[in-house]
Amino acid sequence: MKELKLVSINSRGGRSTVVEVEGVKVGKDFTIIAGPCSVENEEQTLFTAQKVKEAGANMLRGGAFKPRTSPYAFQGLGIKGLKILEKAKKATGLPIVTEVIDPRDVLWVCEYADVLQIGARNMQNFSLLKEVGKAGKPVLLKRGMYSTLQEWLNCAEYILSEGNPNIILCERGIRTFETYTRNTLDLSMVPAIKEVTHLPVIVDPSHGTGKASLVEPMSLAAVAAGANGLIIEVHYHPEQALSDKEQTLNPLLFAQLVRKVRSLHEFMKGLEEQAGSESR
Ligand code: PEP
Ligand code: MN
């Protein structure tokens, strides 16, 4: 692919990157990030965090700054939300993944975030990409909803060229003519990415489908496609969620998903090992 230097698979001689977040090795161990779309209050976040931890999640997600399509929709709690996430981390030990939407916020958000999320709407916000590149914290870079693979990887190149190699790519669906689903989850990107870059890639079936009923089947499909992990929206009472309730799982459904996903991942690993020994 043209213009790609540092993100190219050739730049690391074919070796894949493992992004380490407080002992969680993204790109090596299958990583499940879960939590509410938005941090709403302390009880909601702490309770949900405890539940996803018990179910086997590796990191906690939660938005304190929400990039909403409507200016009248809930915009997030800001600094108050980050302080709630800090408490949730203390209580559960789960590292925090949270979105940053303004370059001016990057440095101080780093005091609370273990992974800085760049949302689909901001994928090509180049001043934001440069700031997170300089900040040095691991970055979760979502695919823009109208972006090609080449455009997406160029954004990762921006971050890498500022000296930050700790990038996790996230396929979260793109806009197509289909309206039954919120987005069209482009799982072909998972093996495609692995052909061209050394960076790990995870899948977001919550935003990718917009429907809670489709999250588990697409999570399993993501595992089969070779994803390095998942990011999933979970809320202790999805019907009361202030954002994205239609695509949010309750803790029980999430726990079932984790069991199935982890056993499918083990099965896939077995198949890989078998294929490896046959070809030797
Ligand atoms: C989110 O993760 O809550 C979010 C807003 O995702 P995206 O940027 O993929 O729409
Ligand atoms: Mn959301």
Image (cartoon, rainbow, N blue to C red):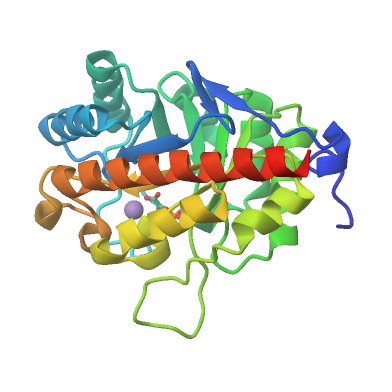
Q: Is residue 86 visible?
A: yes
Q: Is residue 224 left or right of residue 242?
A: right
Q: Is residue 68 visible?
A: no
Q: Nearer the viewer, residue 266 or 235?
A: 266
**As drawn, 242 above or below 208:** above
Q: Position of residue 260 (x, y in %)?
A: 31, 46
**As drawn, 87 above or below 43:** above
Going 27% across and 60% down the picture, which residue do you hit? 247
Q: Is residue 75 left or right of residue 152?
A: left
Q: Quadrant of residue 258?
A: top left
Q: Position of residue 75 (x, y in %)?
A: 30, 50
Q: Quadrant of residue 149?
A: bottom right
**As drawn, 168 above or below 151:** above
Query: Which quadrant of the figure contains the C terminus?
Result: top right
Going 29% across and 26% down the picture, which residue do you hit? 85
**As drawn, 88 above or below 4:** above
Q: Nearer the viewer, residue 31 or 120?
A: 31
Q: Position of residue 155 (x, y in %)?
A: 70, 49
Q: Is residue 31 left or right of residue 257?
A: right
Q: Residue furthest front?
A: 278
Going 42% across and 33% down the picture, which residue do you hit? 97
Q: Nearer the viewer, residue 278 or 197?
A: 278
Going 15% across and 35% down the picture, which residue do you hit? 41
